[in-house]
Amino acid sequence: MGTFLQQLVNGLELGSLYALIALGYTLIYGILELLNFAHGDVFMVGAFLAAGAAALLVHNEVAAIPASLIVGLMLLVAMGGAGLLGVGIERIAYRPLRNANRLAPLITAIGVSLLLESAIQVGVSPAPVLVPTNALVPQTVLHVATVETPLTGVMLFVASVALMIGLDVFVFRTRFGSAMRATAQDREAATFMGIDVDRVIMVTFFVASALAGLGGVLFGLRYASIDFFMGYLLGIKAFTAAVIGGIGNIRGAMAGGLLLGVLESLVGGFISTQYTDTFVFLALIAVLLVRPQGLFGQPLTDRA
Amino acid sequence: MSASPQPLPATESTHQLKRFWESGPAGWNKTLTSPRALIPFFLVAFAVPLALQYVEDNSSWIGAQYWTLILATCAMYACLAVALNLVVGYAGLLNLGFIAFFGIGSYAYALVASDQIHQRYPLWAALLVVVVVTLAFALLVGVPALRLRGDYLAIVTLGFGLIMRDLILDLDRPPVLAGHQFGPDGLNITNGTNGIHNVAPFNLPASLPLLGPVPHYRMYYWIFVGFLALSIYCMLRWRNSRTGRAWVAIREDELAARTMGVNTFKYRLLAFSVSAVMAGIVGMINAAQIFNAFPSPNFDVQTTVMVFIMVILGGLGSIPGAILGAIAFTVPPFLLQQFVFYKYLIISVVLIAVMIYRPEGLLGTVSIRPRKTMGGTLELITAEATVEASELPPVTDAEAADLEATAGAIVEDPEWKT
């Protein structure tokens, strides 16, 4: 029982990371029906931006900056930088192909993903980079009964739940959110209603990518080591989570992320540590076979 | 003799060249894939290593073997590009686990042609094993995934590629699931990260009639070129058949194809599995050529992306394009070794640029350009019509009377009235 609870907590921690990235996938897919393969790599770039900011500020010789301020600046740099990167990617790589055959933007997305990976590999570091997390956040480990979890893990969980709620409010309670939903439903009709579709898509990319950037910061603080290839597998798993929850559905993405994290953690704890990824993708295939619209999604119809 | 230069007389051949140039990508494809162009191409491709050998024997240049190896790699990638073209270019399916089938083929052959599990099958049996194994994997992925929408196929195949990579890396020891060990202690199927070594090459004659002794590297170049020719022959036969038309119909508009009674699932599965088996056979030839089956390039998603860019640069649906793309992305890395570090950076930039500026590729037959909106097309048509009407000579009275008479006759025609 103790192991089970421990694995459950580990799973929730991992799952909230998946959920943060899955939120971005689901937002972009909801609006453009585009599988943004580069999203996981935007997360990775966010982590690198945060690590760069931390490396500049932590042991600088000018002034001792309080750790909380550094973390704040890291968040600003990573979220802002990742957000702008997302907007730039949309502008350069996806917008020219918006009305093209569905295959075209998918292929470009793979190209962008590979471009970001190799740019970081060539331009920054082919080896893992360390984040000075010891100097930034207290490394306390919380004990509740037999379960223990680091404070950073709790931060990850709290941040992703808070952002999910915030995003939900943004999409369902604000004027801009209803413009987003209108764009997702029918882009042409939204244009007729006076919605600036380009702007809606731009903001969507900014928000989604900023969330990924935040995920990158928290990943760096929690695991202390980042590398250029980490966004790839994490991105695919986050997309899997979004599909399991029902793509295009914000609450579904959150639930799918947590579910996938718990599943992975339980498989790792009780079945096999070697084959966790295999089980994750088998779960994806099983969900797609039984309920292609995902656990929380509306039944899908092919748009002709 | 007149000193002023005379304009060159336009000969029949320059006319032909001009016509060829003006026929556009679809015309180039038709010309380049016609038997008249393909037979000389393959004859030249066949003779190139002999010519290289001749040059080496008669000059101080040494590099026949090196260049034949490069060309063999080109031919291998051309085979892969043609196979990927079948699934992406003809059927419009985004198979991102494509290269895994290449890896599966090479491991399947390596297992039955090495001491790894102490099996050495004759060539025909090994080929059968490779075909059956890759087909089984293709059906395993294809049957569930092809029932889904296109985007999901991409993610499922991507996940499949990752699973295969993990399996290849982890199956050097018996799998332990929930505390149970499956298989004996010493179980080692794939030899993990090291790959399978000492794979037997095909049991082929060391010398051929007329050609004399054939070294290993040249033999495998010819095998790749031969397989390429065979695949292209099959692809062309297929393209002009009921099956090929069904693929194109599904790619262009799935709903319309289904309405016309095309069994979309069946034809997609066919394209998916045939392409997978082709990739598997190429993997088998590769394993025999290099005496090894390695996990790393054979299962990396970057390799899939590289084959994708070959197909896309050349042009989706185009066979000459696939060959051109394979050459364009195989030869430069050999020549510019110092740029190998930047290889994927360059590949990704080229991929994005091609998709944005020329999505149909250099020789493409499939237009995946953004579709014009209805308004734009109408505007274009009316603009053209206005120009034409103003340039036409005014209708004479006689012509008008003639037209009226014809129209009257049609209206008065009893068959038209009923």
Image: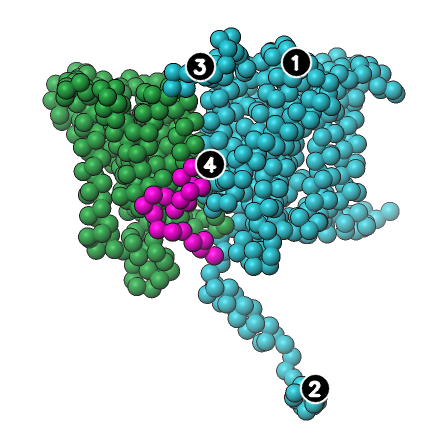
Quick one: SS at disc 4?
A: helix
Mark closer to the observer (1, 3): 3
Q: Label 1 belongs to which residue?
A: B119
Residue at 47% x, 27% y is: B163
Quick one: SS at disc 1?
A: strand
Whichever of labels 1 and 3 marks the residue nearer the N terminus, that label is 1
How crowded pointer 1 is (Cα within 10 Å; few <14, some 14-19, many 20+) is rated as few
Marks 4 and 3: same chain? yes
Side of B172 relative to B320 (left or right): left
Identified by mark 1, the residue type is Gln
Q: Chain of mark 3?
A: B
Q: Label 3 belongs to which residue?
A: B181
Whichever of labels 1 and 4 marks the residue nearer the N terminus, that label is 1
How far across and how far down the image is residue A118, in percent?
Answer: 43, 27
Query: Magenta part of the protein: which range?
Result: A286-304
Side of B124 relative to B24 (left or right): right
Disc 1 and disc 4 in contact, CB within 8 angstroms: no
Disc 4 and disc 3 in contact, CB within 8 angstroms: no
Identified by mark 2, the residue type is Glu
Disc 2 and disc 1 in contact, CB within 8 angstroms: no
Residue A182, magenta (yes or no):
no
In the rendered view of the protein, which quadrant contains the C terminus of chain B?
bottom right
